């Protein structure tokens, strides 16, 4: 073999090796990133498949959300609306308001973002309350109710009574999850899980190339959120999931338990047999709102509601008349159940 042939063969081998290395690198799966942080007084955990860490962008989206819908932020849009300032609301507020009104109508008022004065009065809201008497509850009911507030096409909130204030906490976390999911999708991410305080959106597959596994906690009284014992595990993808329960945010007074879910119709904490309601929907904001609605309704009414809705599935944990723990789930929920945890 002459020198020229050897030289040409060398370059051919080098080219083949280079092409092989490029193909190997191109076909190598992208790494999964994991970000954690604090937001809205709770923890967020986000896992996603991308070549770069996107936490800076995620934090920017959460900050934008906080500037619109956090009642703890004095400059947020919702705070300004509650102070009756003459403003045009932003798109985030408008989206949450519109969806909230839809769910309020669908649930006959079991879901209601004007319940804030009552939530505050019972000590569960963004303002410190005192234990209310029946006279105070009757007074507050005069200016609560989703029918007493509207949003014009130009973006102005119209109140029938200026004392009406809004609290979107029963839907905002779910919408924040949707916002982050949308951000990740815009970055080209197709496999991810976004979890903000237990409200979840999942897409694609997990790092083990399987559906994402999401646990449902046992409804054990746990005001410190230290108990993580699971009732069951869901295997899911391409859905939003939210759980509402009365086993963590509660207090006792004179031997009686008062939980944070307020019935908008009565003005009092919802007293029924429901301990925990998990809802699966196309988006997390809807799942969040429906889960809260089911807690207000109680098992019998909530069961009728979810069975009439082919677009959602639900898993309820409740107590029977003898005080025993029971579960109910929709037919469609069966495909998500990975099995009970003992």
Image (cartoon, helix red, strand yellow):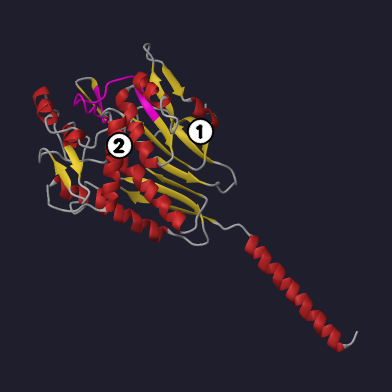
Check the image and name the residue furthest to the bottom.
3
Q: Which residue is mark 2?
A: 102
Front-most of residues 245 and 4: 4
Q: In the rendered image of this protein, does residue 294 appear above or below residue 162?
A: above
The numbered dot on residue 86 is none
Q: Residues within 10 Å of mark 2 (few under 14, many from 20)?
A: some
Q: In the rendered image of this protein, does residue 65 appear above or below residue 325?
A: below
Give yes or no for residue 49 being in the magenta stretch.
no
Q: Is residue 159 left or right of residue 20?
A: left
Q: Position of residue 326 (x, y in %)?
A: 43, 19
Q: Is residue 257 left or right of residue 330?
A: left
First of labels 1, 2 by sequence position: 2
Check the image and name the residue furthest to the right.
1
Q: Which residue: 48% across, 38% down?
A: 214
Q: Position of residue 327 (x, y in %)?
A: 44, 21
Quadrant of image for the N terminus:
bottom right
Q: Position of residue 51 (x, y in %)?
A: 53, 61
* Helix, strand or loop for disc 2: helix
Residue 38, can we see it?
A: yes
Q: Residues within 10 Å of mark 1 (few under 14, many from 20)?
A: some
Q: Which residue is mark 1?
A: 233
* Helix, strand or loop for disc 1: strand
Q: Is residue 288 left or right of residue 260?
A: right
Residues shaded magenta: 257-277
Q: Position of residue 288 (x, y in %)?
A: 35, 37
Q: Main secondary structure of the magenta part?
A: loop
């Amino acid at each position: 073999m002459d020198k020229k042939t050897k030289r040409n063969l060398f370059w051919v081998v080098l080219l083949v090796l280079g092409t092989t290395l490029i193909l190997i690198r191109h076909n190598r799966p992208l790494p999964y990133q994991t970000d954690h942080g604090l937001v809205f007084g709770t923890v967020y955990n986000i896992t996603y498949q991308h070549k770069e860490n996107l936490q800076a962008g995620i934090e920017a989206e959460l900050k934008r959300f906080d500037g619109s819908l956090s009642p703890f932020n004095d400059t947020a849009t919702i705070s300004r609306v509650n102070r009756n300032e003459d403003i045009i609301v932003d798109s985030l507020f408008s989206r949450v308001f519109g969806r909230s009104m839809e769910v309020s109508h669908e649930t006959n008022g079991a879901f209601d973002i004007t319940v804030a004065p009552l939530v505050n009065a019972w000590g569960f809201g963004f303002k410190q309350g005192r234990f209310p008497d029946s006279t105070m509850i009757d007074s507050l009911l005069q200016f609560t109710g989703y029918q007493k507030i509207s949003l014009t096409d130009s973006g102005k909130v119209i109140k029938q009574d200026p004392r009406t204030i809004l609290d979107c906490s029963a839907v905002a976390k779910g919408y924040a999850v949707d916002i982050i999911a949308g951000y990740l999708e815009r970055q080209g991410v197709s496999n991810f899980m976004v979890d903000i305080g237990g409200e979840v959106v999942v897409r694609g597959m997990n790092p083990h190339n399987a559906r994402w596994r999401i646990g449902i906690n046992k409804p054990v009284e746990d005001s410190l959120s230290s108990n993580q014992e699971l009732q069951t595990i869901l295997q899911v993808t391409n859905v939003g999931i939210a759980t509402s329960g009365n086993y963590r945010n509660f207090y006792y007074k004179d031997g009686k338990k008062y939980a944070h879910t307020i019935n908008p119709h009565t003005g009092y904490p919802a007293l029924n047999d429901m301990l925990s309601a998990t809802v699966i929907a196309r988006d997390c904001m809807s799942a969040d709102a429906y889960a809260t609605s089911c807690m207000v309704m109680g098992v019998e009414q909530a069961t009728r509601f979810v069975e009439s809705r082919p677009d959602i599935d639900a898993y309820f944990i409740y107590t029977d008349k003898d005080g025993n723990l029971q579960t109910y789930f929709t037919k469609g929920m069966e495909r998500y159940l990975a099995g009970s945890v003992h």
